[in-house]
Image (tube, helix red, strand yellow):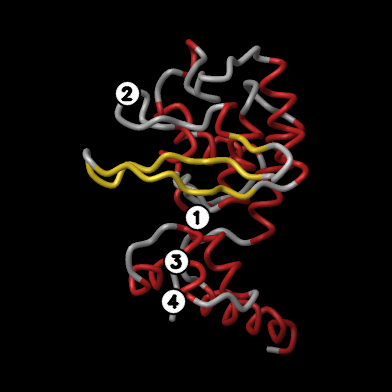
């Protein structure tokens, strides 16, 4: 069971951030990056890599276009790397194709860290806050909060912790509890329902 966290992302927050990024994209790929964070539940390092040879980010050759998934590379330990499936929807597929073509990204190039102006993971870590501010969301937002929202949404849709663990790659079901903000959303929703009556 989750506990209340002061700053968590609502579905409305995610929608505003994505809409703002799509309409007012500062640099090519901002919207795609945020879309992947929001809709796949992947960690920032699984999408970007680490900017070094230790962990690769998503590359065009990792995408299975017809099957609508991509392989993400996860370094568990230096000697133990794992590839995990990252499921994609139609919008992500179209955005990926357009982005790869527009930026002339080669099959073996990382999708995001190939750009000279964007060679640091830190520039991407700041994007959620940038677009949250632009959307008028008065919260501190981090990239990892998208993962929290993703897991909470799956729990609200009836997914078990065991199934979520398989999808997200968590080692232990107990580690998922701190991602689950379901209780906070239920309490907030119930309170807002009666707010006008108080």
Q: Earlier in the sequence, mark 4 or mark 3?
A: 4
Q: Are marks 1 and 3 in contact (CB under 8 Å)?
A: no
Label 4 vs label 3, nearer the camera: 3
Q: Earlier in the sequence, mark 3 or mark 2?
A: 2
Label 2 vs label 1, nearer the camera: 2
Q: To which residue does mark 4 refer? A: 2
User: Residue 131: which disc?
Assistant: none
Q: Nearer the viewer, residue 158 or 122?
A: 158
> Image height check: is 184 above or below 133?
below
Q: Quadrant of the C terminus?
A: bottom right
Cα distance, mark 4 to mark 2?
36 Å
User: Residue 165: which disc?
Assistant: 3
Q: Which secondary structure, mark 1?
A: helix
Where is residue 139 drawn, in percent x and y?
A: 52, 52
- The residue at 41%/39% (across/down) is 45
Q: Which secondary structure, mark 3?
A: helix
Q: To which residue does mark 2 refer? A: 53
Q: Nearer the viewer, residue 46 or 22?
A: 46
């Amino acid at each position: 069971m989750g506990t209340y966290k002061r700053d968590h992302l609502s579905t409305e927050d995610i929608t505003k951030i994505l809409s703002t990024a799509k309409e007012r994209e500062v640099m090519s790929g901002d919207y795609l990056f945020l879309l992947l964070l929001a809709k796949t539940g992947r960690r920032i390092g699984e999408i970007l890599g680490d900017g070094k040879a230790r962990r690769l980010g998503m590359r065009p050759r990792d995408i299975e276009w017809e099957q609508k998934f991509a392989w993400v590379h996860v370094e568990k330990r230096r000697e133990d790397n794992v590839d995990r499936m990252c499921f994609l929807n139609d919008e992500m597929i179209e955005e990926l194709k357009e982005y790869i073509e527009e930026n002339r990204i080669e099959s073996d190039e990382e999708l995001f860290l190939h750009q000279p102006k964007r060679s640091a993971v830190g520039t991407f870590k700041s994007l959620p806050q940038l677009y949250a501010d632009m959307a008028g969301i008065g919260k501190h937002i981090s990239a990892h909060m998208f993962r929290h929202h993703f897991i909470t949404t799956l729990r609200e849709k009836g997914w078990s912790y065991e199934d979520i663990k398989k999808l997200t790659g968590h080692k232990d079901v107990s580690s998922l509890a701190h991602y689950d903000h379901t209780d906070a959303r239920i309490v907030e929703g119930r309170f807002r329902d009666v707010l006008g009556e108080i």
